[in-house]
Amino acid sequence: MDVATLQQQLKKSASAPVYLVLGTQQALQKQARAAFTKLIPDEEKVMNVGNYDMEVTPISTAINDAVSAPFFGEHRLVMINKPYFLTGQRPNVKVDHNVDELANYLKKPEPTTIMVLFAPYEKLDGRKGVVKLLKKNAVQVDAAPLKEAAARRAVESLFHDAGVKIEPTAMDELVRRCNADYGRMSASVQQLALLSYPDNVVTAKMVAGLIEQSLDNNVFHLVNAVLKRDQKTALNLYQQLLAAQTAPLAINGALVNQFRLLIQIKVLAKRGLSQGSIASKLRVHPYRVKLGMQTVRHFKMQDLTSGYLGLIDCDIQLKSSQRSPELLFQLFMLKLGHVA
């Protein structure tokens, strides 16, 4: 189930003995944690809520807490954080975990304890016996990064809960400035809701005034200008980045990364991979792939490789010569124009 379904379920019905919150989207992990914490009355939290970090605390400590009866309450909540031993990861920690204790607990969990494992990972190691037991006996909550459409719906729901309406153009602007990242979008909801008073309507102007353009956003527009050989627009955008105190090496590095991504998208799309498959393979947000696919269909591979190689040369010049970054960028644009 997703986090929204979890929140509704916990309000309406009894909780399950064991939950697994799996996924790297920190905003969703945080929302799930808050939903579970609300199950324990405030006056009981000190005695009936346990929070254990598996990178510093043995699993046996959490299990001992889980098998204990609640103290003057109906339930005990035991939250197990970063259970890396369920994955193939080997972090540099000095904690001994008796995973068999967790496996035995999963076979017969305490009815008065709500155990929640918060796993901020893409996936678990399905070959491990304890993972198989966990998937069999726990309710799994999905905290993976949301795709653009799902992120839009989730953020609209947050605005609705806050009694605020967001205009379609404002949502588009929010998605663009946050690269459709649900964590960043949701973090802006409260401030935008305050800005919308007294009309309680969020506009695109409010979004633009609150959320700064990220380097990736600015570079995306710059890349398009470079590919179109639009020297005037490209130089103007480059100067804006310099005026915003962005380091020349950071600008060039972002340009190199964007061109590399476009080349990879071009190759993988030609092989027939879908947007979602490309995003998964390259480990980037689907929204970036969506924008990339819209870009590469208008340009040849030679355009992309020429820009990429030119920027690599520009990077070398930035590190080894005394020429101004602006001049080096102008020279890069001139050389790229001759290649066309």
Image (spheres, helix red, strand yellow):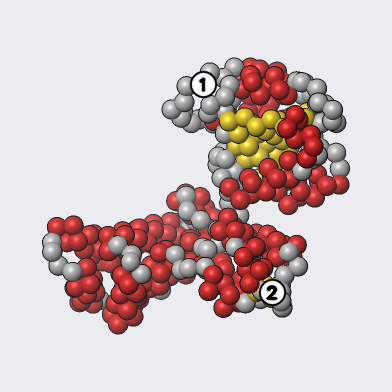
Which percent across, then down, holds residue 48? 76, 30
- In this rendering, the answer to whether 1 lies above or below 239 is above
Looking at this view, name the residue that lies furthest to the bottom.
Answer: 232
Q: Is residue 262 left or right of residue 67?
A: left
Residue at point 77% right, 24% down? Answer: 109
Q: Of helix, strand and loop, which one carries label 2? A: loop
Residue 234 occupies which quadrant of the picture? bottom left
Q: Of helix, strand and loop, which one carries label 1? A: loop
Q: Is residue 225 left or right of residue 168?
A: left
Q: Which residue is mark 1?
A: 95
Is residue 10 in view from this perspective?
yes
Total labels drawn: 2
Which percent across, then down, holds residue 137? 74, 29
Which percent across, then down, holds residue 192? 62, 68
- In this rendering, the answer to whether 111 lies above or below 261 is above
Camera-nearest residue between 183 and 99: 183
Which percent across, then down, holds residue 173? 56, 72
Q: In front of the other: label 1 or label 2? A: 2
Label 2 is placed on what type of residue?
A: Tyr
Residue at point 22% right, 75% down? Answer: 330
Residue at point 63% right, 37% down? Answer: 118
Label 1 is placed on what type of residue?
A: Val
Q: Which residue is mark 2?
A: 197
Residue at point 78% right, 40% down? Answer: 42
Q: Is residue 212 left or right of residue 175?
A: left
- In this rendering, the answer to whether 137 lies above or below 41 is above
Camera-nearest residue between 153 and 131: 153
Residue 126 occupies which quadrant of the picture? top right
Say whether disc 1 or disc 2 marks the residue closer to the N-terminus: 1
